[in-house]
Amino acid sequence: MSKKPKEEFSCEMYSNKYFMLCAYGGACACGITHTFVTPLDLVKCRLQVDPAKYKSIFKGFGISIKEGGAANLVKGWAPTLIGYSMQGSSKFAGYEYFKYKFSKMVDEESAYLYRTYLYLAAAASAECIADIFLSPFEATKVRIQTTPGYTSKMRKAMPHMLATEGFGVFYRGLVPLWGRQIPYTMMKFASFEKTLEYLYENVVPKPRDQCTKIEQLLVTFTAGYIAGVLCAIVSHPADTIVSKLNKDPGASIGGIIAEVGPMGIWRGLVARIIMMGTLTGLQGFIYDGFKVKMGMPRPPPAEMPESLRKKLAAKK
């Protein structure tokens, strides 16, 4: 039986070129997917800020189409594409970078045993930086999508917001954006990594290195979709607050919570679960597919170090 030929890669794992390509892959993964679900995101935002008018997902779509046709459903696509491309670039490359750096701060066995905490710390660090790039475009997107009669063009909206409300308007929602995105990304990467481990150990009928690239990408999509559902639930209250703040810059977080109440803070959750499950699954698929296309090394799910395996075997 002939040996499987050694795979050649376009870059070394964790080299500068590797992280640069991760940034490109992250931009593609987030920019494309978020732009793709712009209609669902628009209806979700409108449902959050004006529940009396839109009432449900289906009514939201119907009213939006009736008021402005199909074009009304893609309002905000430009700030979505640019903002989430920048955010995705920083998030995915940052996660890979921080995960690598944090794992080198401890020994190999500790890095494996406490890997979930490592995933969480790396994800939080990456997202904290990524949201600084996203915040101005998120503020613009929500203003375009939720303010009746407002321009639908980003090139007009951003200068108008800057001229009338000052530079701070673009970062007024940064703290609640962190409150939404950091828990989301921590859950996203940690649950993705753990789900991937579980699928290969308990569901996929053969080892990862025996799977074809397509089979591996399908497993990646499945793990991403599951992670996306969990992310949506964890981060939804903060998402409602971000939508409200960006529509009404004069509002406060406390005032919004008092206005919508404990149940209202969850309004739009079904739409967001559908959106984030699809988004996260597709993001993983595109990001991993980009790595395959570019001939990049793709680290397998975490494996127990041989030294730890021997220690555990000796205790039995």
Image (tube, rainbow, N blue to C red):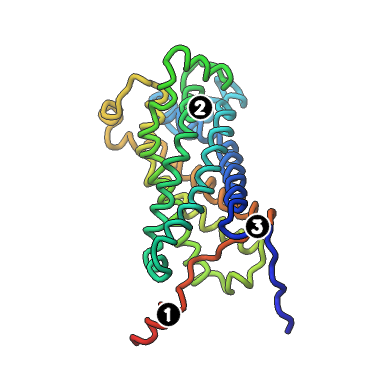
Quarter placement of the N terminus: bottom right
Identity of the residue furthest to the right in this view: 2
* Element type where label 1 sits in the image: helix
- Mark 1 or mark 2, which is nearer the start of the sequence? 2
- The x, y position of residue 315, in whole percent, is 33, 85
* Element type where label 3 sits in the image: loop
* Element type where label 2 sits in the image: helix
- The x, y position of residue 17, in whole percent, is 62, 51
Residue 168 seen in this snapshot: yes
Residue 51 seen in this snapshot: no
- Mark 2 or mark 3, which is nearer the start of the sequence? 3
Please identify, in this view, whether the residue under mark 2 or under mark 1 is nearer the observer: 1
Q: Which residue is mark 1?
A: 309
Residue name at image x 61 percent, y 43 percent:
28
- The x, y position of residue 168, in whole percent, is 40, 22
Residue type, numbered disc 3? Cys
The circle drawn on residue 100 is none
Residue name at image x 51 percent, y 16 percent:
150
Rounded to the nearest angstrom, the CA distance separating label 3 from label 2 is 37 Å
From this view, report whether residue 31 is shown above or below residue 199. Answer: above
Residue name at image x 42 percent, y 83 percent:
310
Q: Which residue is mark 2?
A: 141
- The x, y position of residue 29, in whole percent, is 59, 45
The circle drawn on residue 11 is 3
From this view, report whether residue 11 is shown above or below residue 68. Answer: below
Residue type, numbered disc 1? Arg
